[in-house]
Image (cartoon, rainbow, N blue to C red):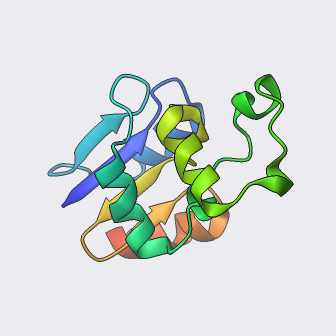
Amino acid sequence: MQKVFYLKTCGTCTKILKMFDLSGWELRELKSAPVTEEELAQMYAHTKSYEALFSRRSTQIKARSIDLKSLKEDDFKKLILEHYSFLKRPVFLTDQEVFVGNEKKNIENLEAFFKVE
């Protein structure tokens, strides 16, 4: 399995996707095809945390007046399944590992995974 979850309207996502050869990867645009419970479970199997998959930058947090400090693991899971913007992105998912988000360390790990010079 090789899947990438991203938003086509996110400049950072598209920039990161262009860095790698994704032939043979399934590209999933989250707004048109949201993450399924099964896919989220596969991501969770690697991270052992729904909070690690949760985007604290989602505009829905303010729109829904969500208090992040009061959320538990199940709350993070429920929110991610409810609205695509709660999933940190991009997410590169393989059978062996998952790469979540656009932090510098994650990009370095992706470069090592794809063997980018």
Say whether residue 117 is left or right of residue 51.
Answer: left
Q: Where 70 sits versus 8, above or below?
A: below
How many numbered markers are drawn?
Answer: 0
Say whether residue 26 is left or right of residue 76.
Answer: left
Q: Quadrant of residue 92?
A: bottom left
Q: Residue at x 58, y 34 (%)?
A: 85
Q: Quadrant of residue 60?
A: top right
**Residue 17: image location, x then y, percent:** 41, 45
Q: Is residue 100 visible?
A: yes
Q: Is residue 117 visible?
A: no
Q: Residue at x 39, y 44 (%)?
A: 5
**Residue 69: image location, x then y, percent:** 85, 56
Quarter of the image with the N terminus is bottom left
**Residue 105: image location, x then y, percent:** 62, 71
Quarter of the image with the C terminus is bottom left
Say whether residue 29 is left or right of residue 73.
Answer: left
Q: Nearer the viewer, residue 88 or 44?
A: 44
Q: Where 108 sits versus 80, above or below?
A: below
Q: Where 80 sits versus 99, above or below?
A: above
For the view shown, which residue lies furthest in the left direction?
24
Q: Residue at x 61, y 52 (%)?
A: 76
Q: Where 47 sits versus 67, above or below?
A: below
Q: Nearer the viewer, residue 8 or 71?
A: 71
**Residue 59: image location, x then y, percent:** 73, 28
